[in-house]
Image (cartoon, rainbow, N blue to C red):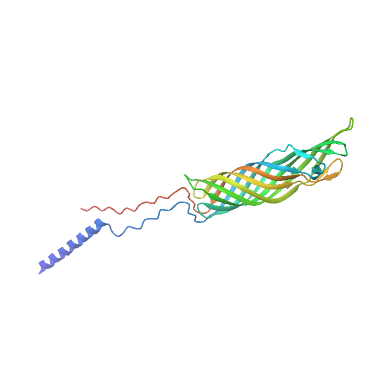
Amino acid sequence: MGSLKTFALAGAMALSAAAMANAADLGVGLPPPPEPLGLKGTIGSGWYLRGDVGIGVQSVDKYEQADTIAYGGSFFGKTDETAFFAGLGAGYRFNNWFRVDGTLEYRGGSSVGVNDSIYNPFALGNQTNTYKGNLSSMVALFNAYVDLGTWNCLTPYLGAGIGVARNQISGLTDQGIVFANQPFGPVSPTLGTASSGDKTGLAWALMAGVGYEVNKNLTLEVGYRYLNLGDAQSGPIRNAFLAESYAPLKAKSIDSHDFKIGMRWNFGDPDCCGPVERPIYQPPVVRKY
């Protein structure tokens, strides 16, 4: 009787060992599901801050001054000027291809300059004037961008902006010379100065550039922008010799071709450098002896 019990116990143990060996050969349990293949660029939080600096080549479409127009005069000799600017902003990135931001920038280091020629009826002769002054601007824009895809962490973009510009002309001088037509008539200088004047109006911009993702938070940018700043004007011009005041000098349709560099600090997790490769699950290898 004892022998039968011993044989039964040994058979049960043998069956159990065989089942465990088969389970080891097949792998224990089901493998976990593979992680989905995601694309970098998924934004946890799309908010970002930005900063930009650059240089612009500014030009004035035309100049106006009421007294010059009244006497049938004309302007000539206008020149393009450079301007330096710096700005800050905040924005939101909705997805991998669309983002918006608001920016505020200061533009300085530029100037206005032009000459005019008129007939002076009081001196019975021609008069020329040279206007020179400083031009500065504060520009607030709301911008929208389309990102055109990412290759090796480089993302080209196109954009447009609209907002307001406050342009100021300061330190304006009006240096003139009167050439009298009378025999041996005098050649007399004139000097006028103007107080600061400012004008606020519509501004708009078109942009193109490329961003480079340094890491998941920092993106560097280089770009070009066409910016229309609207109009500007000085204060009234006062003649120091005649103690008379004249109408302000007006600069109409100021625009600029800007070249800038900047950075964006992303608060989310953009990682826009291409697909993320996930490791493939490999079941444990168990050797059967």
Q: At x 25% / y 57%, what residue is drawn?
A: 26
| Relative side of 78 to 162, left or right | right
Q: Residue at x 16, y 65 (%)?
A: 9
The quadrant of the rendering that contains the N terminus is bottom left
Using the rendered view, name the quadrant where residue 83 is placed.
Answer: top right
Q: Position of residue 54 (x, y in %)?
A: 62, 43
The quadrant where residue 117 appears:
top right
In terms of depth relative to the viewer, which is nearer, 7 or 168? 168
Q: Residue furthest front?
A: 72
Classify 23 as above or below 146.
below
Query: Which residue reaches farthest top?
Result: 184
Q: Residue furthest bottom?
A: 1
User: Residue 140 or 90: which is nearer the viewer?
Assistant: 140
Q: Residue 196, position in %: x, y? A: 76, 46
Residue at 71% in and 44% down: 135
- Residue 119 at x, y = what percent? 83, 38
Residue at 65% in and 43% down: 256
Q: Quadrant of residue 11?
A: bottom left
**Which is more toward the observer, 181 or 91?**
181
- For this orientation, the residue located farthest to the right is 183
- Total labels: the figure holds 0
- Residue 164 locus on image (x, y percent): 67, 52
